[in-house]
Amino acid sequence: MIEINEFDKIIAANWKLNCSLDFLKHYFNKINSNDIKPGVCGIISPPLVYIQNCSLHLKSSSLFLGAQDCSLYNKGAYTGENSASMLKDNNCQFCIVGHSERRQIFGETSKDVKKKAENLINQGINPIICVGETLAEKNAGSTKNILYEQLSNSLPEKSSSNSIIIAYEPIWAIGSGLVPSLEEINDIHSYIKSDINKFKNYKILYGGSVKSSNVKEILNLENVDGVLVGGASLDPIEFTKILNAC
Ligand code: 13P
């Protein structure tokens, strides 16, 4: 398992359901991760069927390999699933769990997220656990309550700041071009770190419409330890800029 506390900043790409062999050829010709500063952890999370292909490409780079989800189950009659041990066999070092798209579209609960994170930790893979509020919840003033509930129920008992990364992704900011103000981002991250005392030392990433043009000011915030990037990570030039923004 990678010791998260060794890093100052974490820059993770989530490609979601976007990839092809042509895409990979183009991407790895163009991305330049050689200039990443020491202390920065760069992660690429492709769709799972391309994980081996990416793993070969990443051999000569300083980027780590991540998955976007893993099964609740470890083995057996669960058609279509991929277990944490299978991710391990395929060189995955990180795995996103509890992304809002999984929670909203696939009905994943915080209890499921916790079990998946446990499975990952048991295999020595670092979970990136996502939390975030809807626009209606934000407008109702319940963001902090929602985050408290999601965090309390999604993190395994044996989690530590060295094994688990938290990603705060306001659902209304994902893919929308909308970003909370810098004060709002810092306030939420500070709430997770200071008010929910047990997460004091955790690395907390911000995600939602991060681009090369806004990443620097977000990364400069005191309580932001990195970013989780969707759309902008699909462009290798753009993602190279984001990796080098620290
Ligand atoms: P966008 O960067 O496309 O808004 O997506 C964020 C996200 O969901 C990363 O997990």
Image (cartoon, helix red, strand yellow):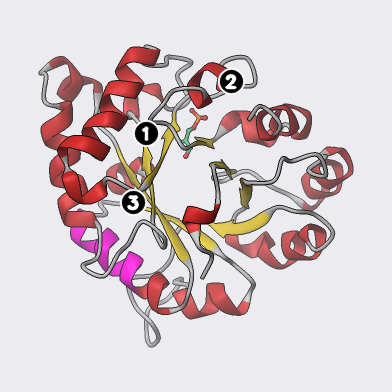
* Magenta-drawn segment: 109-118
| Residue at 18% over, 21% down | 136
Which of the two discs, 2 and 1, labels the residue nearer the N terminus?
1
**Few, some or many residues within 10 Å of mark 3 (<14, 14–19, 20+):** many
Q: Is residue 51 above or below residue 234?
A: below
Left or right: 39, with 52 as reference point? left
Q: Which residue is mark 1?
A: 169
112 is within the stretch colored magenta? yes
Instruction: Name the front one of labels 2 and 3.
Output: 2
Q: Is mark 2 within 8 Å of ligand 1?
A: no
Q: Is residue 66 above or below residue 233?
A: below
| Residue at 69% over, 46% down | 38
Marker disc for residue 216? 2
**Few, some or many residues within 10 Å of mark 2 (<14, 14–19, 20+):** some
Amino acid at circle 1: Glu
Q: Which residue is mark 3?
A: 98
Which of the two discs, 3 and 1, labels the residue nearer the N terminus?
3
Question: What is the C-alpha distance between the residues marked 2 and 3?
Answer: 26 Å
Q: Are marks 2 and 3 in contact (CB under 8 Å)?
A: no
Magenta span: chief secondary structure: helix
In the rendered view of the protein, which quadrant contains the C terminus?
A: top right
Amino acid at circle 2: Lys
Question: What is the C-alpha distance between the residues marked 2 and 1?
Answer: 17 Å
Question: What is the C-alpha distance between the residues marked 3 and 1?
Answer: 11 Å
Secondary element under disc 2, as helix, strand or loop, is helix
